[in-house]
Image (spheres, grey):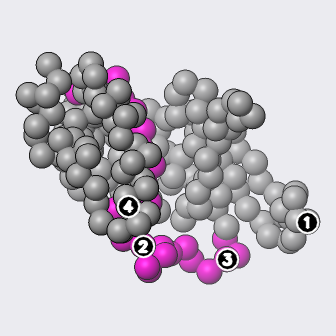
């Protein structure tokens, strides 16, 4: 396989200092690197920026760019807010619930936990408006194998009908509790 891992994922932020402090305070992600330039190294375009890199655990890096000379950042108006998000894994359901309580105590609106059968998630937004998901695995034996058997059939049906195939409806209708012990 050509790709070994994701080196880093980069998003734009409104304020690099605020972003670094927020991620460290609320998610325990330490700032590992800051880079600032007056021109883009790849294109040579004059465009001052601050580029920060945060430790997302397990060798994963989450990065942000602050671009002070550009039009204030926004969202794609044609994409619902729930669609584009970054999902981060936590170690247990208890960690998920404890984090939800801490975030809410800090005044951050949190949705969930939402039961996705394979994992449970909470959702919230960072100071720049990026939607984040924290997920705790709740996988039961046989679930991944069942999904593997229908993945291409589901995708082919979707491609033809643009209607949700029902092959894995058990994930959100609760039947998984009886199907996978």
Q: Is residue 79 magenta?
A: yes
How far across and how far down the image is residue 88, in percent?
42, 38
Q: Which corner quadrant holds the N terminus? A: top right
| Residue numbers of the magenta segment | 68-93
Contact (Cβ within 8 Å) of mark 2 with mark 4? no
Give the alpha-carbon distance from disc 1 to disc 3, as whole Å: 16 Å
Where residue 70 sits in the image (x, y, percent)? 67, 77
Gap between marks 2 and 4 measured at Cα: 19 Å
User: Which marked residue is nearer to the observer: mark 2 or mark 3?
Assistant: 2
Q: Are marks 1 and 3 in contact (CB under 8 Å)?
A: no
Question: Could you say whether the residue bearing mark 2 is in a helix, strand or loop?
Answer: loop
In the image, residue 140 above or below residue 3: above
Looking at marks 2 and 3 on the same chain, the residue that comes earlier in the sequence is marked by 3
Mark 4 Cα-neighbour bin, 10 Å: few <14, some 14–19, many ≥20: few
132 magenta-colored: no
Instruction: Specify the quadrant that holds the C terminus.
Output: top left
Label 4 vs label 3, nearer the camera: 4
Q: Is residue 26 visible?
A: no
Residue neighbourhood size for the residue with mark 3, other residues' Cα within 10 Å, grouped as few (<14), some (14–19), many (≥20)? few
Q: Which quadrant of the view contains residue 156?
A: bottom left
Of mark 2 and mark 4, the one earlier in the sequence is: 2
Residue 179 visible in the picture: yes
Comparing labels 4 and 1, the label whose residue is closer to the camera: 4
Q: Which residue is mark 2?
A: 79
Q: Is residue 19 left or right of residue 174?
A: right
User: Which residue does the numbered mark 1 point to in the structure image?
Assistant: 44
**Residue 123 falls left or right of residue 65:** left
Q: Which residue is mark 3?
A: 70
In this rendering, would 93 be left or right of 159? left
């Amino acid at each position: 396989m050509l790709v070994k891992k994701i080196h880093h994922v980069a998003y734009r932020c409104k304020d690099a200092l605020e972003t670094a402090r927020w991620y460290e305070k609320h998610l325990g992600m330490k700032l590992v690197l800051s880079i600032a330039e007056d021109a883009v190294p790849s294109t040579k375009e004059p465009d001052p920026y601050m580029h920060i890199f945060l430790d997302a655990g397990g060798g994963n890096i989450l990065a942000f760019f602050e671009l002070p000379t550009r039009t204030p950042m926004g969202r794609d108006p044609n994409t619902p807010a729930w669609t584009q998000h970054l999902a981060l894994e936590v170690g247990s359901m208890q960690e998920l619930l404890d984090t939800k309580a801490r975030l809410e105590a800090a005044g951050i609106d949190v949705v969930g936990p939402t039961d996705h059968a394979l994992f449970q998630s909470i959702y919230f937004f960072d100071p720049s408006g990026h939607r984040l998901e924290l997920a705790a695995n709740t996988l039961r034996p046989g679930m991944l194998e069942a999904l593997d058997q229908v993945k291409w059939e589901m995708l082919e049906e979707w491609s033809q009908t643009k209607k949700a195939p029902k092959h894995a409806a058990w994930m959100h209708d609760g039947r998984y509790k009886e199907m996978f012990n």
